[in-house]
Amino acid sequence: MDTRTLLRERLRRSRDWSAAIDDLEKELEASGSKPEQSERLFELAALVEDVIPERERALGLYQRAWKLHPDNLKALSRAREVYGEIGRFEMVAKLGEMELRSPAAPTNLSAIVGEALLDSGQKDRAIPILERALEIDPDSVRVKDALAAASYDPEFWADEFDRLTDEADRFDEATAVRMLVRAARILRIEAPEDERLEELLKRILAKDIDEPSTNFLYETLLAGTGRWDELEAHHRRRAERAPDHRTKIEALRTFGLEWVQRFKDRDRGARFFDAALRATVSNGVVPMRSVVAAFALIRQVLGERGEWAQLLDMADSLIDRPSGLAGEDKLYIAIQAGEIAFDKTNDLDRARRFFTAAARIEPQNPVVQDFAAAVGMPLPTPEPPPAPVPVMTIAVPVAPPPVAAPVAAAPAAAVAAVAPAAPMVPAAPIVAAAPAAPAAPVAGRRSGATTPPPGPPLDLDAAIVAARASENTAD
């Protein structure tokens, strides 16, 4: 039996899952070689992600697994990814730099770390890493764009900002977004308190609701000024505009984690987890990751307010889902709901129903046996374990991911003629804002000027040069 299966079997027969994880952690480090201990801790950390809503515990286990055996690079990589999921780009950069010391580091890691540094305001540290990324992949427009945003002339940054923002609407949506993102990055570095930054970020989001760097900067701006209601509303818009149900569920789950971990707001985190679970139930087919962690946080928050009925209704819906839950998920929710019905609402019939569902999964669980003994409930024959439900995870970028439509690299001459090339930005988890508006022609444009070609140009700055040349010819 592999480590993960052994760990889950242990939980199935435990009274207190959190205490069981404490015991398992001690046992896993008590025997075996350091590589073996490291691998076991990695498996335990993955299990903790599913069970405990706060991410500190899993992150600590991943980092200890890596320190025990630095060749177990996947432990450090997963810790970096978790930080990316909760919007902690500065930690993505920190762990990514450690990961880059290994010859086994992913080839795209320099690009990820460079962009994370740039978007967290560490321009000077970003430049050499982005240059290294460009050596690895000379054709990466994303890297060229990020490097361009970091390599402007500080003496003339205001001119560069004005040029990009003034000319962006001459081009198609994708090209305009690239120009405006570069402008936003420059403004955030040079004048983070400038009131134009917020309006610029909203302008980008109105064009591309999936722009990750913009969302990171916008979230940081709202959080920095304590505008929590606006930030929550922004997250809800992003989730509502998700392209499909699976993506919506993953967005809501991720926002819940972000509120718990990054913004330290358990109540708002619980609201997003609640919305994710309800969306899961309403669909009946699309599974959700970390159901136990989500339910555990909601239980904490609603329990503090004594809102037990709402929690029991949710438990009923989850247990009765047509596609069902994984065995351990269903067991945990059934036991928690059974205890609440028995101890908090004095609803014996409902408690029996929950504990019967739990007993069909694991009759040897001590909480199930205690209830059966207390009320004289016969234990049913356990069900065979269900086949695992495939869960399609939605990758949440730890830093801007590759753009949907690649753009070719800029010719060196064009770059020298205008300014560094602008980066094509990464795709964010689910972004949303104002509905995308079609690009309108620039007011006052001379008749006879050549219309920019559809789709992103081969090079952003080269396109700007070409547009100017066309206008001069028209004159």
Image: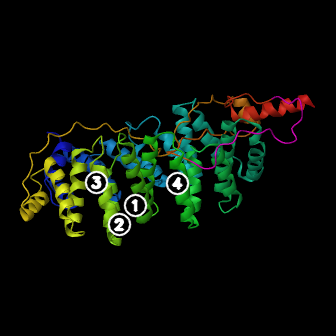
Identity, as a three-letter code, of the amino acid under mark 1: Ala
- Residue at numbered disc 3: 316
Of labels 2 and 3, earlier in sequence is 2
**In the picture, which quadrant includes the N terminus?**
top left
Q: Nearer the viewer, residue 62 or 208?
A: 208
Marks 1/3 in contact by CB < 8 Å: the verdict is no
Residue 13 within the magenta-colored segment of the rendering? no
Q: Residue at x 8, y 65 (%)?
A: 374
- Check if residue 448 falls in the magenta segment: yes
| Residue at the spot of label 2 | 302
Q: Is residue 169 left or right of residue 266?
A: right
User: Mark 4 or 3 closer to N-term?
Assistant: 4
x, y percent for residue 111:
51, 40
Is 364 situated above or below 3? below
Extent of the magenta region = 432-450
Q: Residue at x 25, y 38 (%)?
A: 388
Q: Amino acid at mark 2?
A: Leu
Tell whether 50 sits left or right of 208.
left
